[in-house]
Image (cartoon, rainbow, N blue to C red):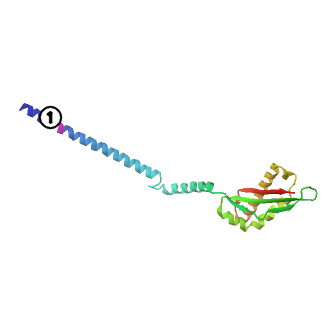
Amino acid sequence: MPAKEDDLDLSGDEKSTAKPKKSKKLLIISIVVLFLGASAGATAYFTGMLGGEETVVAEGEEEVEEKVSETKQPLNYIPLDPAFVVNFGEDSEIRFLQITIELGTRISEMVDQVKEHRPAIRNNLVMLFSNQDPLALNTREGKEKLREETLVEVQKVLEEETGEPGVEKVFFTSFVMQ
């Protein structure tokens, strides 16, 4: 019988060691669940899903999205048809200049604004082109300078009429002097 008692004692020892193992597992699981819940709550709070930070984060996100969307907008090309034809003074061999122009804007509403104010834009550009030195326009630098002056004139008209320059680029798609 002593062997049976040892067996009983062993089974009794197994039962006494089994209870602490279950409670340790339960404690570890509880700590893990508590940690995961706390980290999920902190993440939700700091990303603005919880708490008073929501409006501040949302406003900041809107500003960032506006800047990103502005830079990613495609360039809209607006032709200023018909081509510009101006004559130069009598003291030059080159008598005529013909330029075909397209404007570039990333603001889609500006396309209609340019079309609406096309007469004022064309007027200012005719005055600008007719006052050019034809010899200077024979060089790339002269053409680039004229392109920059053209952009300034277009932006000046749009600024006066709409309150914003609106156009960011000018392209000479045809440039003929005779």
Residue 48 shown left or right of residue 87 in the figure: left
Residue 30 shown left or right of residue 4 in the figure: right
Q: Give the magenta-colored segment's residue range.
A: 9-15
Q: Is residue 13 above or below residue 47?
A: above
Who is closer to the viewer here, 83 or 10?
83
**Mark 1 surroundings: few (<14), some (14-19) or many (≥20) residues within 10 A:** few
Q: Is residue 53 magenta?
A: no
Magenta stretch: dominant secondary structure: helix
Who is closer to the viewer here, 15 or 34?
15
Residue at image coords 65%, 64%: 109
Residue 45 shown left or right of residue 66 in the figure: left
Q: Position of residue 132 (x, y in %)?
A: 86, 56
- SS state under label 1: helix
How many numbered marks does the figure carry? 1
Q: Position of residue 36 (x, y in %)?
A: 37, 47
The amino acid type of the residue labelled 1 equals: Leu
Q: Which residue is identified by label 1? A: 10
Query: Looking at this rendering, what residue extends furthest in the right direction?
Result: 91
Residue at image coords 54%, 55%: 61
Residue at image coords 27%, 44%: 26
Q: Is residue 14 magenta?
A: yes
Tell me where residue 166 sits by quadrant: bottom right
Tell me where residue 11 sits by quadrant: top left
Q: Position of residue 48 (x, y in %)?
A: 47, 54
